[in-house]
Image (tube, helix red, strand yellow):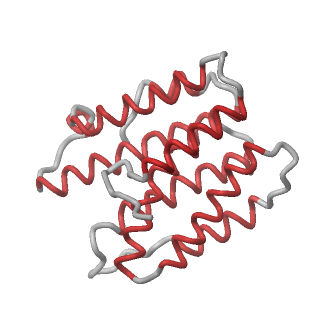
Amino acid sequence: MIKNPVQLRLAKLAPWQQRLFMICLCERMYPNLVFYCQQQHTEEVAKSYKKILDLVWESLLVEEAKINFDLQLEKLEAIIPTVTDDSPYMIYPAIDACQALGEVLHSYLSGEMADHTAKVSSISATTIAEFEMTKTNVNLSPDAQQTLPSVIDEFDLQWEILRLLRDENNEMIELIKGLKDEIRASGVSNIGVFLCG
């Protein structure tokens, strides 16, 4: 797993801020799952993921939202793709998206934040590094992976989200809605997969 210095700073944020960071990265990984599901004609899997994603956004926006996170974790675990000999490459970014969302749900169940936030940060960066290594058919050490331009771009984006979270002028609800709308409007994943429609 790739480590990013941002992870140490994230650990100092309030729980809702760390969850917002995680869900932003999950939202960016969502198109990878959608693309894989389109390849496999399993669109219902992507819809199930989206429902869980929407519930987490709701939990941030609606303080009294009653959500059974145990049940959501069960639903998520039921849709994680299984790798077989003839699986296409996109199964791996799809699984990463599921694992990242699983970390968010575990943060609600355990009350622990820092480890889950760091893992989601690492999962997103690792998805990108593995995608680049697959494209070029070159295996890189973890240190070398961190120097890939696309991984550096990912770190820059994660730092930008951190800066927004730390900006005390940002009103909580407006910040959450703004980030959600911006990521969804861009419709592009961390590895450049576009979400159509």
Residue drawn at point x = 21 percent, y = 36 percent: 148
In the rendered view, would you say 137 is above or below 7?
below
Q: Residue furthest right?
A: 64
Between 173 and 197, the one nearer to me in the picture: 197
Whole-percent x, y for residue 100 in the image: 52, 52
- Seen as rendered, the residue at the extreme front is 197
Q: Is 129 on the left or on the right of 134, as rendered? A: right
Q: Can you give x and y, in whole percent of width and height, for residue 140 in the image?
A: 18, 44
Residue 83 image-quadrant placement: bottom left
Nearest the eye: 26 or 96: 26
Q: From the viewer's side, name the closer residue of 19 and 146.
A: 19
- Kindly tell me whether residue 94 is visible in this rendering: no
Q: Residue at x 42, y 74 (%)?
A: 37
Residue nearer the viewer, 166 or 112:
166
Query: From where the camera sits, is residue 158 visible?
Result: yes
Tell me the quarter of the picture where residue 179 sits.
Answer: top right
Vertical placement of residue 122 versus 159, above or below: below
Q: In this rendering, is residue 55 above or below 169? A: below
Give the number of callouts. 0
Q: In terms of image quadrants, where is residue 193?
A: bottom left
- x, y (%) of residue 77? 59, 69
**Residue at image coords 28%, 74%:** 88
